[in-house]
Image (tube, helix red, strand yellow):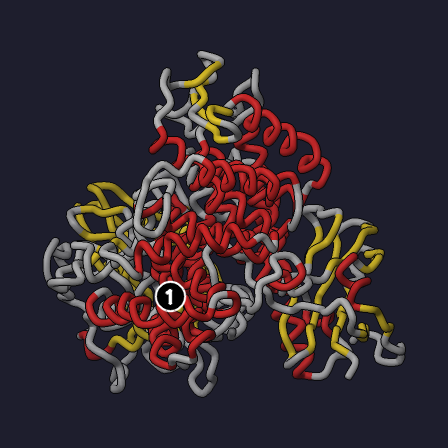
Amino acid sequence: MSPKIPIFAFGWLVFGLSQVLPAAPVPTAGAPQLKDRPPDAETVAWVRFSDAPERYDGVPYHWLGHGDLRLVFEAPPAPGQALELLWGAKDDVRSAALGVNGVLQPLEAGGYRGFRWLRVPLTRPAGGGDPLEITLTAAGARPAFVAEARLTAPGGAPDRPGLDQKAFRTVVLARGMASAAQVPGVLADQRAFWDREPSATLFGGLDAAARARFRQAERNSRLAAEAFFRCRHYVTGWLGVADPRTGLIPENLSRGRDRWNGRNNAADNYAFMVLTCALTDRPLLEGRMRQMLETESRLTRRLDRLGDWYQFSRAGFEHDTLDWDRLVFDNAEYVKDGLIPLTEWLGPSPWSERMIGLVDDIWKHAPVPTPAGPLPTLNFEVNGDLLQACSRLYWFTGQRKYLEWAIRLGDYYLLGTNHPTRHLKELRLMDHGGEVVNGLTELYVAVSRAAPEKQKAYRAPLREILDSILEKGRNADGMLYSWYRPGTGENSGKLADTWGYIYDGFYTLYLVDGTEAYRAAVAKALENLAGKYEGRPWADQSMDGIADAVEGALNLLNRLPVASAAEWCDRQMRLLWNVQRADGIIEGWHGDGNFARTTIMYALWKTQGVTVQPWRKDLRVGAVRNGPALELFLAAGEPWEGKVIFDPPRHQTTMHLPLDYPRINQFPEWFTVADGRLYEVADRRRGDAAPTRHRGADLIKGVAVTLQPGKPLFWSVSAVP
């Protein structure tokens, strides 16, 4: 991943006078009319915000009131360059502060309705190779809104694509990341800390290659610090709206304010409050989070250990009668979306015990007779949840019954008359539909090791599903439709934010059977993300759509590194983070937990799986890989003593899986240490100091560290041959 350019890195650019060109407003349809401005042939780089949720007269735009705009135009300096902004107004005057490579200038324009071009001539010395970085920040009572930004120069760019492409030679560093002046409360207090680029002297004594790596590790440390802080702040926000009698959080802050259920509160929100506390607040994990688990287990029990909807005002069930379909859906969702990811990270715990109890009781009451054996339900989504849960529980517990239950479902969908692409009229690839595809691939891993006769029976019908998706369920870039009809090829025309989840299954079959076409399909999707699928191009327009898309990409990037897709993830996370409110709550519904789940996954990528205990908001931990070694940056704003904890190969040590196949709701492994190996830890700033040696088991338990302000550690960690 290429390093981002610090916003105040250069100071050699000077401005000409800004001017509003007397062009007519851009019409609502077709290409913008660019009268009285340099011709399109002079445009050398551009970006338009066609994915923005805000629109005026049909034109999508970015409003600075929602946060800063930071862009890099990847074009060298040239005489006659100008920055041109498609500037919006509503019969008023709009203002902004423009920064160009560190030099600031106020902008103000308006008095018309619609969009006109605001042109800022630039003077940049030719001959250098530095790109142009700009920032636009809200100023005045009416922040500006901008639909497009262009860099122009006489002669233009002869190799550019057509202007119908959304972006060309432009990188969006941040869109909607509000400045400290705009974000109230604790987020504003931390903004300067997260954004502050260190002095070059911090990296003195390192050779050029090491300096570049540790600069990136330091940047990653600030991103991880922001990620963990935001997650901890999210927990504070939701605890602040908890029911005062039970201590349970509500389903949402509107119509669901008076209820708790397994499918929403528990599966999507509470579980990731637990995970956040495991990483940032162990006392809260063992206190309030454990209490909530005990409370929901006790109050919501409707049938054996299975929970039902609980109404706070009634101090009892919301529904007077038991409905099995509602019950099985709630508890299967709680298992798959909440308790499995907790178990993937925590291992055996009270939450894994809850998971096992729910799965056992779902199958205990399985009421649906089929040729494959009794099933809990014929609900397609729920059976996908159970396929995933049982396939993993087989390895986690070592108990054969979970594999046998999963095989019943495999037989039902692959060997009977319920094949997802042969017999179903429509296959949904978004949430609430795609779970069976992944569940069947997880089962395929299990039978490939434990029931080879089933692997042989499943191979052809399972490939038939995947081949159908590749043939009819994706667009030319490899992005998946939210649904398609296998028989006719008709599709929704809208894209699934869960594309990466489905491709997990493709890569899994590649790992088991070596089917190269499935690996290539994954690579194609990753390679086409940047520049084409920025913002919210998904059918799901909530922040959850962004979160799911990033998760899918990160899980696959762990297996197939694609630099442009990695940078895409960085940009998408900025868009996701901007949704968070000052009080910590995100959008005020159960999907807020998915914000935390994705943010934690992102943070662990930036630390390469390294965590610290106890966590504190002034800590910075970031890492990059140097071949098989890890370069780790550690710093604190105040004196700190604690442990630096390295990640084991959790798929083996925790889940006991036979291979680390990509799976929904896992937290990818980046730099892992093996229990029985020996490792060296060298401080790169102290070249004369001998490396210390540690057993892998000790690194996993945590290395005791003392940090002093202004004295960061620059560790290089590698296995001893």
465 in relation to 230, above or below: below
- Examine the image and state in which quarter residue 441 appears: bottom left
**Type of amino acid under label 1:** Tyr
**Residue 229: x, y in percent?**
60, 46
- Examine the image and state in which quarter residue 704 appears: bottom right
Task: Tell me if 186 is positioned left or right of 90 in this view.
Answer: right
Seen from the viewer's position, the closer of residues 486 and 578 is: 486
Instruction: Determine which residue is flagged by label 1.
Output: 503
| Number of marks present in the image shown | 1
498 in relation to 358, above or below: below
Say whether residue 258 is visible: yes
**Residue 72: x, y in percent?**
42, 69
Which residue is rendered at x = 78% and y = 73% of the image? 677
Task: Tell me if 218 is positioned left or right of 37 in this view.
Answer: right
Seen from the viewer's position, the closer of residues 373 and 330 is: 373
**Residue 189: x, y in percent?**
61, 42
Which quadrant: the C terminus?
Answer: bottom right
Which residue is rendered at x = 46% and y = 46% of the image? 337
**Residue 331: x, y in percent?**
45, 36
Q: Secondary structure at mark 1?
A: helix
Within 10 Å of disc 1 (Cα), the crowding (few <14, some 14-19, many 20+) is many
Say whether residue 493 is visible: no
Which residue is rendered at x = 47% and y = 79% of the image? 130
Which residue is rendered at x = 37% and y = 48% of the image? 373
61 in relation to 379, above or below: below
Task: Tell me if 88 is positioned left or right of 96 in this view.
Answer: left
